[in-house]
Every structure is written in C-alpha cells, then in structure tokens.
Amino acid sequence: MLASDFVLGIGNRFANRHTGGLDTYRAGRTFVHVDIEPTQIGRVFAPDYAIVSDAKAALTLFVEVARERATALRLPDRGVWAKECAQRKQTLQRRTHFENTPVKPQRVYEEMNRAFGRDTRYVSTTGLSQIAGAQFLHVYKPRHWINCGQAGPLGWTIPAALGVCVTDPGATVVALSGDYDFQFMIEELAVGAQFQIPYVHVVVNNAYLGLIRQAQRGFEMDFHVELSLENINAPELGGYGVDHVKVAEGLGCKAIRVFDPEEIAAALAQAIRLMAQFKVPAVVEVILERVTNISMGTELDNVTEFEELAISGQDAPTAISLLDCVPAP
C-alpha cells in the first residue's frame, strides 16, 4: 500500500480503523471507489473517482479495457515494482512459531491454519483476538471471515456461529473468542447442545479485556480490565478465573483446556472428532500469557510490532507470503 500510487477499492468501506490517519493513507495516491450503494462512497474521504456499480459489472469492464491495452502494448511493465514489494513483505513477515508457556496467541493461529482447511468459515467478534485472527488466520473464500459487527457486540460469537451452522449445515465452522467475549453469552452453548449444532470454538484466555488493556497502555493505565481470580474450585487454572471447561460441559458441550503450545494441534484434532461424534459445540481453551499485545498503530507507516519479526520459514511455517522455503498451504 505504501509503495502504491493508485488504489482501486471495490465494495469496501475505507473504514477509519483501516485507513488510520488520512494524510498518510492518501499521500500521493489516486483512489477509485466502486460500490453498488452510493451512500457508502465518500463516507470517510472523497475518492478521486466514484463509480456506482455492481462489482462484477465493473470488474468485467475493467478487465476488458486492461486486455485491450495489453494487446495494444499500452500497459507499463510493473514486474520490477511487484518483486520489490514482495521482497519488502518477506522481510516484514510476522512471527507465529513461539514455544513459550504460557502460550503466545500467534502460535494458536498458526496451529489453527494447520488444523482447518480452506473451506472453513471463521466467526469472531470485537476484541484483541478478532484483530489478531484477522492478521494471522488464512481465509480463502467470501463470507468465510464473519466478524459480528463493529465495536460493541461482545458475546455475539456463539449465537452467530450457531446461526452460520444452521444456515450452511455442511460447513466447517470455527469460532474464535477471547475469554470475556466467550463469557458474555456463554449460556448460548446450551442452544448448540439442545439442537445438536456442532462447531469448534477456540477460546484464547489471558483473563483480560485485552483490547481495552492494550488501548490503556498509552495512558499508563490498567483499570478495571482484569478478569483473573483465584478460583477455589479450579486451582489448576492458576488465577485465570472462570473454569470455562466445567461451564461448557455443564451446558451439554465438550471442552478441552491447553496449557502447552505443543498440545494445541492435538486438542484441535480432538475437538473436531468430539464435535462430529456428539453433534455439539466443542470448545478448545488455550491459556495465554497474561499481557498480550497485537500489532497496530494509528498510521499506516507507523504500526508497532511488539514481537520480533520472522527471519526464516521456521518462524512462520504457515505463512502464505513465502519466507525462505516455507511450504505453501
């Protein structure tokens, strides 16, 4: 994006959470925005060219014109530029393979990329886990990354996942929640058990309202965002609070807890089997490090990376952007 001079947006929103500061985002670039709904164009900033059109109709015409120009040898060669961009991306690949205990969240998404195939429909909601999932999980098809609304709808992940399962009974549905999102409407798991709606629910538990805690960093605050408590009935949790496994099982579902990153893959595989066998939601809870920060920033050219970047394929073994000899997914 930073190396571009022309940006074509089709059916997107140019939301401010995506753009960051507009001076940086727009600098030196021509913007074209295509959308079938005219009121969506120019909501955040006015594009240089606005096109009200169905996406397929616009793309068909764009491709037709591009082919005409290619035949007439009127298209510039962007090969060198594309290679330069690819090289820059390779040097900035985020690391996912951590062996730390408690677990780093990046490792969870690495294992999810291995465990779930290209047809997986992911469902998530507002939170640090949703932001991290969007950065690391591989999604290959339209409507296979279902983010339940914008800021506010905590807890919608469970009912939304159930809805996706009912709408597409043959789909592989995997939900992703932080601990607070999961607790917010955890009782809805009973609906999945009652009506035999199977899916896998991955819970990344750091006993924090992670996104709010990270936002407070700049103010040197840590105020009313902890969810930890010494659970006298579950000392094995080590202060991580609510026993999600017991609650999920009490609601008629299956649940597995993981402390060791090397056990995540087996737990996900077991959850898939349990889901299929008992026809109920299967929960995999991974106990994370308490303080987790995910890459973000207010400007496109000023994203803060809290972890060391990958320097070889072994550091990011499921990365799509190849590093060294990383095997393609």
Image (cartoon, grey):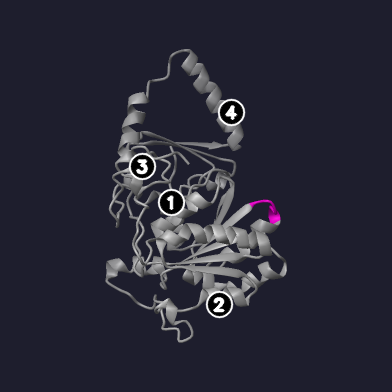
Highlighted range, magenta = 167-171
Q: Amino acid at mark 4?
A: Thr
Q: Earlier in the sequence, mark 2 or mark 4?
A: 4
Q: Earlier in the sequence, mark 3 or mark 4?
A: 3
Q: Secondary structure at mark 2?
A: helix
Q: Which mark is residue 136?
A: 1
Circle 1 crowding by C-alpha within 10 Å: few under 14, some 14–19, many from 20: many
Indicate the position of residue 32 as horizontal and vertical percent values.
46, 36
Is the stretch drawn in magenta largely helix, strand or loop? loop
- For residue 77, which quarter of the picture? top left
The span from disc 1 to disc 4 (Cα, nearest Å) is: 31 Å
Disc 1 to disc 2: CB gap under 8 Å:
no
Read off the residue under disc 3.
Answer: 26
Q: Earlier in the sequence, mark 1 or mark 2?
A: 1
Indicate the position of residue 63 as horizontal and vertical percent values.
54, 25
Residue pictured at 69% horizontal, 52% vertical: 168
Read off the residue under disc 4.
Answer: 60
Q: Earlier in the sequence, mark 3 or mark 1?
A: 3
The span from disc 3 to disc 1 (Cα, nearest Å) is: 26 Å
Disc 3 to disc 1: CB gap under 8 Å:
no
Name the image quarter holding the N terminus: top left
Circle 4 crowding by C-alpha within 10 Å: few under 14, some 14–19, many from 20: few
Q: Is residue 169 magenta?
A: yes
Q: Is residue 207 above or below residue 78?
A: below
Q: Earlier in the sequence, mark 1 or mark 4?
A: 4
The span from disc 3 to disc 2 (Cα, nearest Å) is: 50 Å
Q: Secondary structure at mark 4?
A: helix
Q: Amino acid at mark 3?
A: Arg
Disc number lying in front (1 or 4): 1
Q: Is residue 20 above or below residue 213?
A: above
Read off the residue under disc 2.
Answer: 246
Front one among 162 and 67: 162
